[in-house]
Image (cartoon, rainbow, N blue to C red):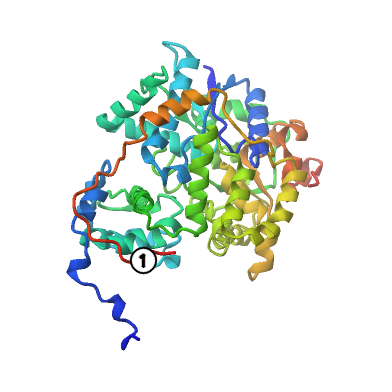
Amino acid sequence: MNRWEGWHKVRYESELAPHFAAEIASIPGGDHLYSCIQCGTCSGMCPLSHHMDFTPRQIIAMIRAGFKADVLSSYTTWLCASCYSCTVECPKEIKLTDIMYAAKRLAIREGVYPKRFPIAVLADEFFKSVERNGRSSETWLLTRLYLRTNPFKMLKQAGLGMRLWLHGRLGLKPESIERKSELRSILKALEKEHMIKRKGNTAPLKEVAS
Amino acid sequence: MSYIYFPGCSLQSTGKPYEESMQAVFAALNIPIKELDDWNCCGATAYMSISELKSFALSARNMALAERQAGAGNSADMVVPCAACYLGLNKAHHYLAENPDLNAKIKGALGVAGLNYSGRARIRHPLDVLVNDIGMKAVTERVKQPLKGMKVACYYGCQLVRPYADFDDQHEPTTMDVIMKALGAEVVDWPLKTRCCGGSLTGTVPDVGQRLSYILLREAKKRGCDVIATACPLCQFNLECYQSEMSRKYEAPVNVPVAYFTQLMGMAFGLDHKKLGLKRLFVPVHAPAAVGGSHVAA
């Protein structure tokens, strides 16, 4: 029994990951991260910031301070719709959208992403479909998304699917390229490569979102 | 000059009317265009969330194929109607040009499959090609049934003009406005031209995503538009296909036709409505009454 319900919100320096900022900054152009002046233009421009658990400005501050567990398990990065408003408006030319991508990829590599959260599942299914066939098939992608997250939602969307089909806008044939082996050999050559350089010791990730 | 058409995964399913109308309009203007042979996914948003390197490799394969298809010494201009593909390919183009290490890695991977990417391929959007290569004079001359009296809200969406496009302004794009005016339509002044429609959030987190689309529809309606013109298959899908769901959910019902700008061009050119995929839209677009009042039922 916790005497004070907010106890878990207190952060100690020992929990921080000192190399986190360097990891994120290792993407091309990522070192602009260090010049953030915390003006909040990104959060002001973001059409989704009011739905996020941390605003984009907070995320940048947290990355620099080493709040790895909190950033990687947050919903903010997954809610980012990649509209690039923040990126084009940032007075310090920080590529915020690309930093959000970097955080997403790191969260997947570390296994701390919200596993049943539909956005992450969609990305995962999209990735697999393209690895397999070279193209994504919208219909099958959405079917797998609903099966993995909320099968009941599929029933709710059946009406929309039917309408699309009646209007000739629903492809039922799984899409695929012809020279799959050519593409596979290209992707295989990059299998072990990562753009984010991992830096030595990082503090253990205690909170894993489910 | 001949163009290489990159459809991307949407234009041959939910975005079918975009492909149909773009090809009809390009044919009407005698612009030679040929589909890229064995194109693959551009490595879009969802893919980039998993592996950025592979996403660039996917784009690079397409660009390498385009260079090969164009032939040595010829320009390799790819016409990419989908805003997400346009951004994905353009992003790879920029990243590979600016980062030698990355370039070497991707080139090495392409080399395994016997492909070569020199950086010669150019990523173009149909808006860019129509306004800057073909020119408004040719478009105006082709107009047979001007869209007189039709009030159009031009919606560019986010990934088309941000952050790599060089053919239009990031904050106040005008290429689509220019085309619509050339068709005789009245362009509605509205401030949400490049505000995000919600992207794939409309399907994954509907309460959040559909609210973003709804904000756009409500504002466009408030400004008295007859139709919203779009240049992206996901924007068009989000704005049109969830309207009945949004009307149930939110304060004011919305019922606004959302068409591809190429469909409106085809209407003004007097092209067969079947070739423009107008019957594939959920909310029918009405041709202005002044020119005969024909309309297409959904």
* Vertical order, B61 against B250 (above or below): above
For the point 56% across and 65% down, which residue is it? Answer: B207
User: Which is nearer the eye, B245 or A175?
Assistant: A175
Residue beneath the point at 48% across and 21% down: B66
Residue A17 seen in the figure: yes
Question: Which kind of residue does numbered mark 1 sit on?
Answer: Phe
Q: What is the residue that sits farthest to the top in this orientation? A: B72
- Inspect this view and state whether residue B117 appears: no
Compared to residue A61, the image places residue B152 above or below, namely above
B294 horizontally vs B59: left or right: right
Question: For residue B263, what is the image quadrant?
Answer: top right
Q: In front here: A113 or B104?
A: A113
Decide: few, some or many residues near mark 1? Use Cα within 10 Å; few <14, some 14-19, many ≥20. Answer: some
Furthest-bottom residue in view?
Answer: A3
x and y, in percent, of residue B151 in the image? 65, 50
A100 with respect to B32 (left or right): left
From the image, tell me which residue sits under label 1: A54
The answer to whether B76 is drawn above or below residue B290 in the figure is above
Identify the secondary structure beneath mark 1.
loop
Subunit of mark 1? A
